Image: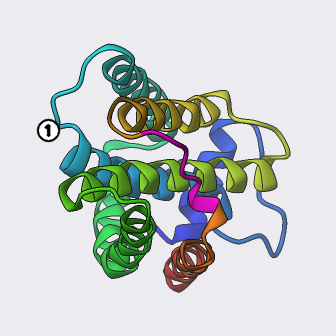
Amino acid sequence: MTILELVDTYLHSIGLRRLKGDSASPLLPFFILDAMYSTLTSDLMPIPVKGKTKKALSDLKHNYNLVNRQFFRAYTQEQQDEIIDIMDAFSSALANDILITKVAVMNQLKRHGVPFEEQKILASAMLCNILAQQASIVWEEVFKHTNRYLAAIERNTKIWMQSYFIERFPGHINPNDDEQICLAVDILCKKIIQFLEKL
């Protein structure tokens, strides 16, 4: 199947249809979310946490699974396998840009005196929050309403990040205040769109 056929199948499953000239953007939130979850599983899940941070992680996984089920149930098993292959290729294609974004976040944390090992953890958490934000923004732009599960995932990543950070360091760090982070995120988002447009 082409990417637009996959789009059409998903839109049909939720009672919508693609207008002439529309792109693969309805699938973007799910691909962004997959990149976020890859970072979460590799960088954050192995870390022992408790209290509010642990609950945020549990809620995040729950909401991610709900979104994933809602998306994949639109497809046959063969189509699901095809989408998973595309998502794997997507993660590989964006690996360098995700790393650049993470390094930009780490540089901001370094300026705030955060030790290197904690920089890596908090940068991954901030990256997850940034990607969750982007998934929500794209969904709202495409469908003209809020996806409550995507909004919940964004909140969950923010709670994880803030509760973990507050437990260890005073003050507040906002990645949206940093020009280099914003630039890296902008480039990352453009690469995501370019990837799907090439399919």
Q: Which residue is mark 1?
A: 46
Q: Nearer the viewer, residue 172 or 120?
A: 172
In the rendered image, residue 139, in percent from the top left (x then y), is placed at 70, 49
In the rendered image, residue 67, in percent from the top left (x then y), is placed at 50, 33
Could you tell me the amino acid type at mark 1? Pro
In the rendered image, residue 119, in percent from the top left (x then y), is placed at 29, 58
Q: Quadrant of residue 186?
A: bottom right
Q: Nearer the viewer, residue 184 or 70?
A: 184
Q: Is residue 38 above or below residue 197?
A: above
Q: Nearer the viewer, residue 136 or 168?
A: 168
Q: Quadrant of residue 141?
A: bottom right
Q: Is residue 27 above or below residue 96?
A: above
Is residue 88 rendered to the left or right of residue 169?
Answer: left
Q: Which secondary structure class fits the magenta region best? A: loop
* Residue drawn at 69 percent across, 56 percent down: 138
Is residue 189 rendered to the left or right of residue 12?
Answer: left
**Span shown in magenta:** 170-176
Whether residue 186 appears in this view of the structure is: yes
Q: Is residue 20 above or below residue 82?
A: below
* Residue drawn at 40 percent across, 52 percent down: 36
Is residue 145 rendered to the left or right of residue 181?
Answer: right
Whether residue 81 appears in this view of the structure is: no
* Residue drawn at 42 percent across, 29 percent down: 163
- Was residue 171 drawn as part of the magenta stretch in this picture? yes
SS of the residue under disc 1: loop
Q: Nearer the viewer, residue 78 or 199?
A: 199
- Was residue 37 drawn as part of the magenta stretch in this picture? no
* Residue drawn at 67 percent across, 28 percent down: 148
Q: Residues within 10 Å of mark 1 (few under 14, many from 20)?
A: few
